Image (cartoon, rainbow, N blue to C red):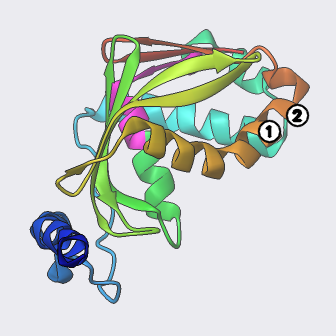
Amino acid sequence: MKIRKLVPIFILILLVPMVTWAFSWPNINFFRKAEPVQQVKQLNIVQKISAEEKFNTWQTGFDKKNLDLIKKNPQNLILSEAELNYMVGRILSESKNPPIQNLTINLNEGEIEITGYLLTPMKGDIDLKIKPIYKEGKLYPNITYSKFKRLRLPTSIANKILYSNLQPSIDKLYKDNNLKNLQIKLKENQLEISL
């Protein structure tokens, strides 16, 4: 009888060091102010102008709900890793409450690697590897590797969290008839979009 009572205590003693190693109290500073988002500085002046033109074209196309403005120039549908980091960095820097800071996107063959400092719902360093998949004619991100702070998360849990937050956005995205055939192709340091 006493052994049954001691087993949970021993398990708790074994788990407490692991939990405190993954989540330390100094890192859970909910009162800490967000640092400004730092943009990747890999673009030269010509590339920056090109990225700015692509960003403005995409923004105008979505604001006017006319994707033909984007499709007019096929170069708008090809983004380099540096251009993508610049555009996402700009969106985050203009956001009042960005969900992530110090975001870096690396494009690999068939996979996207995202690193940064997550601000919501919890704060900490995050590292994700995402492979785009198509289910029922819709594009979904599939997390193949996830790490929060120093804790490796099971991909099933990470995907469940991601899908629950992204499902409304994906449904809204595919309500637009122009985006029914949305496809992306990931190459080394390049993202190709077909609409």
Which residue range is magenta in the image?
A: 76-86
- The residues bearing labels 1 and 2 have C-alpha atoms spaced at a distance of 6 Å
Vertical comparison of 108 with 81: above or below: above
Q: Is residue 4 left or right of residue 67?
A: left
How far across and how far down the image is residue 43, in percent? 27, 33
Residue to which mark 1 is pinned: 171
Asked if residue 8 lies in the magenta stretch, the reply is no
Q: Is residue 142 left or right of residue 47?
A: right
- Res 175 label: 2
Extreme-bottom residue of the structure = 31
Kind of residue at badge 2: Lys
Residue 39: tell me if it is visible: no
Q: Quadrant of residue 149?
A: bottom left
Asked if the residue under mark 2 is in contact with the one under mark 1, i.e. CB atoms within 8 Å, the reply is: yes
Foreground residue among 19 and 165: 19
SS type, badge 2 = helix
Q: Residues within 10 Å of mark 1 (few under 14, many from 20)?
A: few
Vertical comparison of 52 with 74: above or below: below
